[in-house]
Amino acid sequence: MKKAKIIITSFLIILLVIIFFFLCNTFDFKHSQNIKTNEEEEIVKLKNAQGISGKNELYEVVNITQSEKTLAVKENVKFRVALVGMIKDSKPKLEELDDIIKDNSFKRTGIYVNEKSRKKFLDLINKYAIGKYEFDTDGFLIKIDDNEINENDKKILKKINSNEVFIIDFSSIYYAVDDVTGEIVDIPFENMDPYQISIVYKMENQNLIFITNNIKGKITDEEIFKEIFGN
């Protein structure tokens, strides 16, 4: 009899625990759904107020002050659009971002340079470093000799051995999402400002860096090297 009571009591305790966790999960799910609904309603309200016509999922609410809010294109959307534009070397479509990024994921850290920019990149670093470098089959920069190094080599090796990935492309344009229409547009940043050296996007440990082609020759190679690797 005593053994039966113990079994029944244990069963009831287990049942109560299961019910408790079920209710907690249900509450958390409903709470997260309510938050999501409230955010979507706020996005629609701000879109109407600001004349924005892009898709809701492109935007996030940003607090300007405690009482004033605005909409901005999500940082991860900006990054993915610019990255896929670099990979395709043409204007990307929103619906293809995930598939292209999945097929071109960067599973390593270090310095990756877009294929069309690799010769120009090597020419640049060879002017200021004394080590010998090349790109491996994955497009990542590696040092291929054991010779002495100078201060600029140290800066290069610091990024090569970093726990971040630096995705670099020499380009006069990049692709972005228009804040109002939500359309993807090309931004000819070099024509807009020939003195601007770079455009940088960051997402988690990934740094996407567009370096000017410097067609008008307004910037020195040394300035470009320092922009990439620091002073």
Image: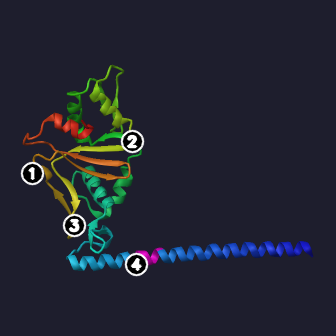
Q: Is residue 212 magenta?
A: no
Mark 4 or mark 1, which is nearer the start of the sequence? 4
The picture places residue 166, in percent across and down from the top left corner, at: 32, 43
The kind of secondary structure element at disc 2 is loop
Mark 1 touches mark 4? (CB < 8 Å)? no
Q: Callout 4: 10 Å neighbours few (<14), some, many (20+)?
A: few
| Residue to which mark 4 is pinned | 37
Mark 2 or mark 3, which is nearer the start of the sequence? 2
Say whether residue 136 is visible.
Answer: no
Left or right of 88 on screen, residue 26: right
Mark 3 touches mark 1? (CB < 8 Å)? no
| Residue to which mark 2 is pinned | 109
Task: Estimate the spatial distance between the alpha carbons at disc 3 and disc 1, rounded to whole Å.
Answer: 20 Å
| Residue to which mark 3 is pinned | 179
Please state the extent of the stretch shown in magenta in the rendering: 32-36
Mark 1 or mark 2, which is nearer the start of the sequence? 2
Mark 4 touches mark 2? (CB < 8 Å)? no
